[in-house]
Image (spheres, rainbow, N blue to C red):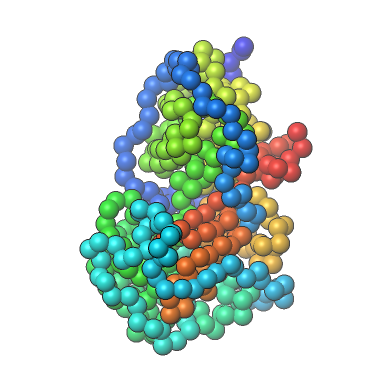
Amino acid sequence: MRLRCLPATRRFHGSGHAIAVAVCFAFGALSCASQGPATRAAPIVDRTSPRPPERSVAQAARAAPERPPAEASSRAPVPADIAPLPPPRVPDVVTAPLDAPNDTASPADVPLSPPAGARSGLPAPATTDLAALILPLDIPAYGRAADAVRAGFMAAAEAAGAKDRSVVIGHAADGMLAAFEEARKRGVRVVVGPLLRDDLKTLAIADPDIPWTIALNRLDDDTPMPAAVFTFPLAVESDARVIARRALAEGVRSIDIVTGTSPLTARMAAAFTAEWVAGAGAPPATLRFEASSDTLTSLRRSLVRAVPDAVVLALDGSDAALAKPFIGALPAYASGLLFERPDAAVVRDLNDVRIVEVPWLVTPGAPEVAGFPRPDFNSAALERLYALGIDAFRASQAFGDAPPERFTLDGATGRITLEGRQFMREGRFGVYRDGRLVPLDDAPR
């Protein structure tokens, strides 16, 4: 087989790339924890270990993922006039006392009872029906990401006829706690925020008296969360778990992970490995990616000598396009959260790669997302944050004097369910075919 050796310095330039760099920098605080590289040189893999018994798709697949944040210095506006919308689908919600029934097991990392070390007091009953959105709108590095969330949240509020019951509280650096205090004084029913991981850590350590809260991030350490805090992260780990379950359901028994050295790609690789092994898959090999001819040749040689059933590309879009020709015809999976909007040349290299993406991008015409306005961000990352704002508003409507015990929503970011104190998200699979990202299950072969 003849290898296609591509230049080691292939990268993207122009406004689109500047947007990608800016938003990825923001995501570093939105969702990245510090980790060392979880990679090694591409190995020669012995695949003689016994394979687990075959499983059917019905046995292996979990709940199916559902159908559904521009280079400008100003914030993305929410359209002033919104066309009449069809009645929104009411999420499947049950509001009940905080403690779970005795026969309900809660995940260890998201207990229903207040975490050890947290204040035992729960929020007092709200004095208004307000929902407050707290965002770092006045921090330049995160202003555009925060504004995308704000736009989505307010679009959903407008669609639900609740714009007059929704308030946005922006803050600058070190102003997050003051924003929460303002929300508490206003007697709000529920707060959505903070957005940044560091702000969530500050909130957890301070443990103030706050209303019911939906944080748009999560912590990776053991810091106890305040009893009032639920989490709704747009996290790459969710995509990794969905990929593992789908690959097992499709009969994949041996799989390699091609990963870079960034904390985000390392997190994806670790989450995939954990879910894959838990599903009775043999431990995957991890192959190191670098944009050099020697490394790419070594990658190809390893895949030829020990051929897996499939490959996971824990890489951003440009690196995935660079690696794809070297994996040949093997089925390849990736997370859309690592991708910016690719140009036409990159899309051709990504042909047949299966992507877990938010329904807002992969099924824009689906009923659950079709009624909302679609601002032109010219950035897939900002569009995802806009979709997060939509779903965060819809989740906030399930909170009254008590939080929901159960919650299910086919939303703009995926199928959302509540497990303990975390809103879990399953994106939808798409595939690149003929220069377009289309739903996988609808794509012609």
Q: How many marks?
A: 0
Q: Residue at x 52, y 82 (%)?
A: 165
Name which residue lies at 58% across and 55% down: 414
Q: Is residue 10 left or right of residue 430?
A: left
Residue drawn at (75%, 33%) of the image: 445
Q: Residue 376: give x, y in percent of width and height.
A: 63, 59
Residue 306 vertical placement versus 121 (above, below) = above
The image quadrant where one finds the N terminus is top right
Pick the residue in front: 178 or 215.
Answer: 215
Residue ranking furthest to the right: 444
Image location (x, y in percent) of residue 105: 41, 56
Residue 98's place in the image compared with 52, above or below, is: below
User: Which residue occupies the foreground of this view, 281 or 71?
Assistant: 281
Displayed quadrant of residue 142: bottom left
Q: Residue 138, how many percent across, how many down?
A: 39, 68
Residue 318 appears in view:
no
